[in-house]
Image (spheres, rainbow, N blue to C red):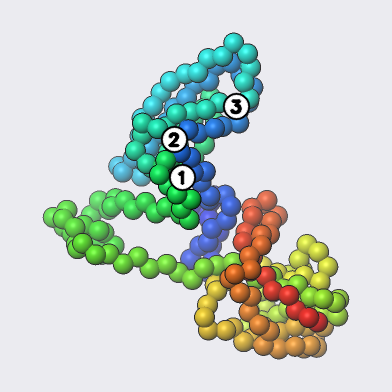
Amino acid sequence: DADFWKKRVNNQYLHSGDLLDLNDGLLALQTAPGKLFNIEVFGFNEVSKAFDFSIVQNQQRFTDNQESINIELQNLPPAKYKVVVNGQEYYCYSDRDASYSRVFGIIELFNVFTAPSDFSLLDGARKPRGIEMVIRFANRLTKWKYILRSSLATGIEIPTLPGAFIDGATDNVFISKNPMALQQQVLKTIQLMNGPAILLSKLPNPQPDRVSTDLDGDGNKYYCSEIYLNF
């Protein structure tokens, strides 16, 4: 979906717009001021493959204008939901146990293939292919940020990937234009430049345990793996 993902060659990567609020069954929403709120809650529809399966329809009325309301989802099974309040859409994940357990993330798997497929969890007879499944994740992607001590360098380059790094928002900072895969095998082709002259070659790669964030021109927040260079 081009509205929510950016392409990385033939793959894609996440940004802050893909994050969901996790609640314990009580969804608190900031709304436009009002006294009457029409509320609808939708679940995932395996037929349409969209969040258009109506689950809840109700209203909340107040004597005075309200700028926030609470929507009760405690009686619904743990899942992702679309909540529509006076026509405004909100997405959330409601799970009391997960909320109190401070989980890192939640994965929902749906078998929505209409025809036999090698990627289906079920075989042609709609029976599970097996009781053990393996999920493989691609390398984590972050923007790579280099922070220098001085202003002697004018840029960072990868000879085989021109324009991979751009100037950061502050002086002496260079950041990759797109997120790059973190990997155990070190990328040894990164060079510190002063115009056409190479100041340093084989720059160290940022480590995944030092993470910051960076905003792009559309206001999306991306994670960065940053490293300081004593240069």
> Which image quadrant is residue 14 in?
bottom right
| Residue type of the residue flagged with mark 3 | Ser
Pair 3/2: label in front: 2
Binning the other alpha carbons within 10 Å of mark 2 as few (below 14), some (14 to 19) or many (20 upward) gives many
The residue at which mark 3 appears reads as 68
> Which image quadrant is residue 97 in?
top left
Pair 3/1: label in front: 1
| Residue type of the residue flagged with mark 2 | Gly
Count of number-bearing discs: 3
- Pick the residue in front: 103 or 138: 103
Binning the other alpha carbons within 10 Å of mark 1 as few (below 14), some (14 to 19) or many (20 upward) gives few
* Quadrant of the rendering where the C terminus is positioned: bottom right
Binning the other alpha carbons within 10 Å of mark 3 as few (below 14), some (14 to 19) or many (20 upward) gives few
Position above or below: 207 against 96: below
Q: Whole-Å distance between the Cαs marked 2 and 1?
A: 11 Å
Q: Whole-Å distance between the Cαs marked 3 and 2?
A: 16 Å
Mark 2 vs 1: CB contact within 8 A: no
* Image disc number at residue 100: 1
The residue at which mark 2 appears reads as 25
Residue shown at the point (57%, 84%) measured from the top left: 186
Residue 219 x/y as whole percent: 68, 51
Residue 201 x/y as whole percent: 71, 89
